[in-house]
Amino acid sequence: MSIIVQKFGGTSVADTNKIREAARKAIRAKQRGNQVVMVVSAMGKETDKLIALAHELMEHPDSREMDMLMSTGEQVTISLMAIALKSLGEDAVSMTAAQIGIKTDNSHLKARIKSISTERMQKALDSGKIVIAAGFQGINDEGNITTLGRGGSDTTAVALAAALGAKECEIYTDVDGVYTTDPRLLPEARKVTRIAYDEMLELASLGAGVMHSRSIEFAKKFGVAVHVRSSFSDTEGSLIVAEPESLAATVCGLALAKKESRLTILDVPDQQGIAMQIFERMAEAKIATDMIVQSVGSDGLTDISFTVPELDRQTALEVLRKASNEIGAGGVEYEDDVTKISAVGLGMAEQSGVAHRMFRALSDSGVNIKMITTSEIKISALIEKEKAGDALRALHKAFGLEKLAVLPNGKSGNVNAKKSAKRGLSQGQTMQTPAEVLARHKSVSNFGMEDILIERVSLDQKQASVTLSALPDKPGVAATIFEMIASEGILVDMIVQSNGDGQVASFTFTVLRNNLRTTLSVCEKINKKLGGRITVTNHPAIAKLTLRGTGLRSHTGLAYRMFKTLHDGKINVNVISTSEVCVSVVVDDEQGEKGKKLLETEFKNELL
Ligand code: ADP
Ligand code: ASP
Ligand code: MG
């Protein structure tokens, strides 16, 4: 008999009527011949209320006690759900994470799942019961209750589906699927019928709150089909799948991380290993950093900027100030009230011109871009928070997302997209089968279910890099540069941009080596157009080293390990790009081979 996991979020179990409705859905799934595991969240805003109570007593409550407190929310729901099922004549049993055996590491508030025992659940299922599991919680080796991070019930659900070999994991929520962007923020957002794991992983990690991004790591790693759908209707929702055969839209969705902060460490001695020390500390504090930009150094000094969620800013600032003193940097600056807006799509990897369309749309709506970073399937821009709504609307229109069509075969495709995204798809589809991953999971001692898996380390020695500095910091500069380059048919790969002191901006980007000459002549034209004060420098041959895998950014220690490995091998890192599915760095061409070998050795346990 096949197993189906159904997860119900907070609004879907907000009162006893809704709990009864959810119970009916589970009964119907059972009547269709499935064994059913329900995963439930705390009722309504219960978790927020519990947190507020703790904060009435103390500003920074102890994290062990917070986990103890917050986990009670789910415990209320599981028992009420079991009572509801029984009231409807169905046999059911509620289980906490400890009763199931959802083992996690010790990091309270952000615990990662190490293993899940299935015996007790399976026994209950085989005896005809519906199992109701508490979402969001786990238990560590000392028997302490842990939680997986806000929104973590999605992760419990997909992880249980993976462990039980369920045929599907249904996520019942208050929207009827995954949309091109948050439908609460933009009414013209469209539902997508199917979306690839890699796309959903990026969107979720970049701010699309509909799914906890770590749940998609599980889904991809173990090949679980996830169906996001409405609790309040029976309409089909969105499928999150590997999706090898579908037409991928150039851009499938937009995500907004509304409350971000940018931190900058100034006048860092431009020596190997400095970046490493900064990110080592952020990793130790379990802060996920993004949009890392090292600005052009003068006098042997560079500025390093990166973004963190505003919630983590205070901790990040303390860590950074300490680091600044120790490494003799010139100090630390930060900026709150900034928003990261990102466009995501597997199709992007093959299309030129996504970047300049994004920058033009932003500039046309008067949005100044403070920072830009790209990876193969996403482009992120940091903008002022108050411009977020305008920016979202402009990009949604620019990428034709309101026209996203549902194709007759049930797959979604952008009517504007001409090509299927072969490059992106092949990257997304190289994971092993769930059985292989599980076999590996058993063969490596202490291999946790949520540990990083790296698909491969790759070396690209076909590119050159160009840096434009001393550019005016005003809307339209990025659009002008990348439109002029795109008009020559030149495909730009990595782009990073950072504003210096608010007066000038600098860009570094990479192009194929055989396009360098043309690119440099375009840069001359750009210089003339933008006032003639731009400095243009280039590296005719760079090497790009990339780690590909799942959940690379959310595993906060990964970027640090990558920098440290290269640093220990005396390899200097010039440009960095981080995302959930790949982390890339630019190093000198002659160091490429050596860097690849070093990374393969460092990550040999995680490499598939
Ligand atoms: P639950 O409590 O069921 O886990 P969440 O509030 O965590 O529900 O997630 C659902 C919400 O996610 C929606 O109400 C919607 O506002 C928001 N959301 C953000 N981005 C998206 C998106 N791309 N597609 C659909 N919903 C989104
Ligand atoms: N109740 C938890 C939260 O509000 C977990 C969840 O709902 O997914 O974050
Ligand atoms: Mg949620």
Image (cartoon, rainbow, N blue to C red):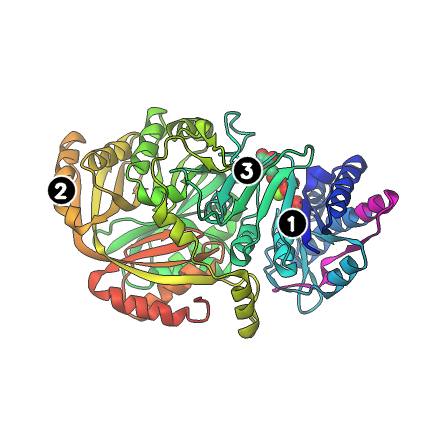
Tell me if I can see residue 165 in this picture.
yes
User: Magenta span covers which residues?
Assistant: 80-105
Q: Quadrant of residue 142?
A: bottom right
Q: Which residue is mark 2?
A: 518
Helix, strand or loop for disc 3: loop
Amino acid at dot 1: Ser
In which quadrant of the rendered image does the N terminus lie? bottom right
Q: Is residue 526 above or below residue 148?
A: above
Q: Secondary structure at mark 1?
A: helix
Q: 42 or 85, which lies in front?
A: 85
Q: Position of residue 528 (x, y in %)?
A: 13, 32
Single out the mark in the foreground, 3 or 2: 3
Q: Which mark is residue 200?
A: none
Quarter of the figure with the C terminus: bottom left
Q: Is mark 3 within 8 Å of ligand 1?
A: yes
Q: Is residue 70 left or right of residue 576?
A: right
Question: Residue at position x 31%, y 44% from top?
Answer: 350
Q: CA distance from mark 3 to mark 2?
A: 41 Å
Mark 1 surroundings: few (<14), some (14-19) or many (≥20) residues within 10 A? many
In primary-sequence order, the first of circles 3 and 2 is 3
Question: How far apart are labels 3 and 1 at the CA level?
Answer: 17 Å
Nearer the N terminus, badge 3 or badge 1?
A: 1
> For the residues carrying marks 3 and 1, which lies nearer the camera in this image?
3
Which amino acid, mark 3?
A: Val
Residue at (21, 55) in percent of width and height: 462
* Amino acid at dot 2: Thr
Front-lying residue, 208 or 407: 407
Q: Earlier in the sequence, mark 1 or mark 2?
A: 1
Q: Which residue is mark 1?
A: 153
